[in-house]
Amino acid sequence: QAQFVESGGGLVQPGGDLKLSCPASGFNLANYNVAWFRQAPGKAREGVSCFVSSDSTTHYADSVKGRVLMSRSIIKNTAYLHMSALKPEDTGVYYCATVDHAYCRSLRGEYIGAENDYWGQGTQVTVSS
């Protein structure tokens, strides 16, 4: 079954760093736009960052700009999310998924998704002292 398998989450103190990994299984990451999402308890899912495959640009939500860096390894078929200066409001379950071009560039609004999108199960990030 084609999917992502996220890892790297955990408990971190405010101001700390985390690196999340998202290896793709069953498909070639290079052929897709890949986004990181997060969902906090009781809140809507939010797009955090996205890599556009066609022009190799990366886009970030305003809430994380300057603190988050998304990268990918074609060799390892893996996407990464490097997070620094973490805040309690960064707490949530982090997912990666393939997304369409329009959403990848804007990261605004709810992502409805398509039947052929690939998703992972998520990894929990908790920022707390």
Image (tube, grey):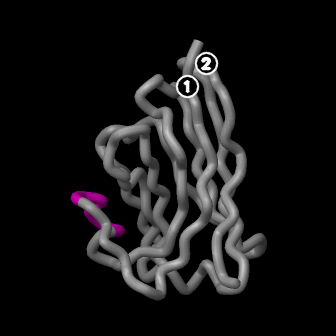
Residue 45 against residue 104 in the figure, above or below: above
Q: Would you call the spot at circle 1 few (<14 residues within 10 Å), some (14-19), or many (20 or more)?
A: many
Q: Quadrant of the N terminus?
A: bottom right
Task: Check disc 2 and give the amino acid type.
Answer: Gln
Which residues are drawn in magenta? Answer: 104-109
Residue 50 against residue 43 in the figure, above or below: below
Q: Quadrant of the C terminus?
A: top right
Contact between labelled residues 1 and 2, with CB atoms less than 8 Å apart: yes
Element under disc 1: strand
Quadrant in the picture for residue 15: top right
Residue 125 against residue 61 in the figure, above or below: above
In the image, taking residue 13 as reference, residue 91 lies left or right, namely left
Q: Which residue is mark 1?
A: 127
Would you say residue 37 sits in the magenta stretch? Answer: no
Residue 112 locus on image (x, y percent): 31, 72
Q: Which residue is mark 2?
A: 13
Task: Check disc 1 and give the amino acid type.
Answer: Val
The residue that appears at 63% across and 49% down in the rendered structure is 123
Residue 90 locus on image (x, y percent): 46, 33
The residue that appears at 35% across and 51% down in the rendered structure is 46
